[in-house]
Amino acid sequence: MFNSKYSLFFIFVAYIQATVESFMINHHSSYRQSTSLAADVQKAVKDVTGAELEMLMQEWDSPLVVDAYATWCGPCMQMAPEYEEAAKELEGRVRFCKLDTDKEENMAARLQIEGLPTILFLDAHTPEGADEDAPKMAALKGRIEGGLPKDLIVGLCEFYFFDGPMPEGFA
């Protein structure tokens, strides 16, 4: 009896959630647009593990921007859609990924992540005196702690990776 009572409760809650979601999608265009936009944008940014990030830092077909975040961090969650929009705008020119610092504590420590969110701007670097065939290493071009709007993320990518001007109001 105990299990069936709670099972019915959870089924009822799921039904209510589905009903509200359906109502919002059918009757509120702003909700419909925001949910479809989120689905489209999420494809531009990949959530990576520490091992996957290591691999990304070995492949240098394009620069890499890393968002070190935590799911409990308000500024991180507030910046997430801005970061995803920037990734979408620069798709094909710059790679974007996210690293959950709670799940990947070792990598966060190696990257010396102390404040959230932290955005790392990384590009390829060949050490001086190395052969042309030597593997390229990651070079930190910039590091920002704190949330940024999309335009500033894009502007910093242009500055760090493509010799663009430093974004206005940023020094």
Image (cartoon, rainbow, N blue to C red):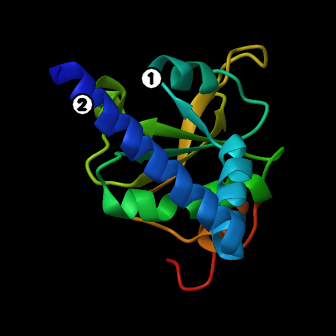
First-in-chain label (1 vs 2): 2
For label 1, the SS is helix
**Quadrant occupied by the N terminus:** top left
In this view, which residue lies farthest toward the bottom? 169
Viewer-side residue, 81 vs 118: 81
Q: Which mark is residue 6?
A: 2
Q: Which mark is residue 137?
A: none
Q: Amino acid at mark 1?
A: Gly
**Residue 17 visible, this orientation:** yes
In this view, which residue lies farthest toward the front? 1
Circle 1/circle 2 CB separation < 8 Å: no
In the drawing, does residue 28 fall left or right of residue 162?
left
Q: Is residue 97 above or below residue 127?
A: below
Relative image position of residue 103 (x, y in whole percent): 33, 28
In the drawing, does residue 72 fall left or right of residue 43?
left
The residues bearing labels 1 and 2 have C-alpha atoms spaced at a distance of 39 Å
Q: Determine the residue positioned at 73% across, 16% down.
A: 131
Q: Is residue 115 above or below residue 153?
A: above
* Count of numbered tags: 2
Viewer-side residue, 152 vs 101: 101
Q: Which mark is residue 50?
A: 1
Relative image position of residue 111 (x, y in whole percent): 37, 36
Q: Determine the residue positioned at 40% across, 57% down.
A: 76
Q: Amino acid at mark 2?
A: Tyr
For residue 3, which quarter of the picture?
A: top left
In the drawing, does residue 74 fall left or right of residue 169?
left
Q: Is residue 151 above or below residue 91?
A: below
